[in-house]
Amino acid sequence: MFNNLYYGENSSTIFAFAAGAGFAGLAYPVGLGASKMAGLVLPGVVFPSNMNPSVPAIFQGSKNALPANIGTAAGSFTGGMSSFVPGQDAGKLK
């Protein structure tokens, strides 16, 4: 809508809304799938390089945050792809 006013274009806001909603709807499942796949490949727990021998090893590791970050990045990338879809002229949709 801003482009129509600022640049004098005749782009369809309905098409832009539908494309944005479609990519936004795909963003969550793509991010979840990427996170699960990364979790299968990467270790679930990361241990420090200098482990304390007086503390059990199960209490020294921390959860690996990389699979969740990969999923977030993949979902954000998918959701933002709608801005690269060229718009349709409003006259062509009638």
Image (spheres, rainbow, N blue to C red):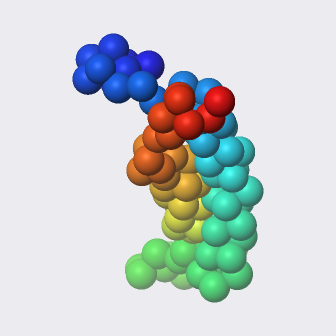
Q: Nearer the viewer, residue 32 or 86?
A: 86
On screen, residue 51 versus residue 37, left or right, reads left
Q: How many marks?
A: 0
| Residue located 51% across and 46% down the image | 82
Q: Nearer the viewer, residue 53 or 67?
A: 67
Instruction: Please provide percent x and percent y for residue 36.
Output: 71, 70
Q: Quadrant of residue 40?
A: bottom right
On screen, residue 69 versus residue 21, left or right, reads left
Residue 67 visible here? yes
Q: Eyeballing the image, is 9 above or below 69?
A: above
Given the current orientation, which residue lies at the most extreme bottom position? 41
Instruction: Please provide percent x and percent y for residue 58.
Output: 69, 73
Instruction: Please provide percent x and percent y for residue 44.
Output: 66, 74
Given the current orientation, which residue lies at the most extreme left position? 7
Q: Which quadrant is the C terminus positioned in?
A: top right
Residue 59 visible here? no
Q: Eyeballing the image, is 62 above or below 91?
A: below
On screen, residue 56 versus residue 88, left or right, reads right
Q: Which quadrant is the N terminus positioned in?
A: top left
Q: Nearer the viewer, residue 25 or 94?
A: 94
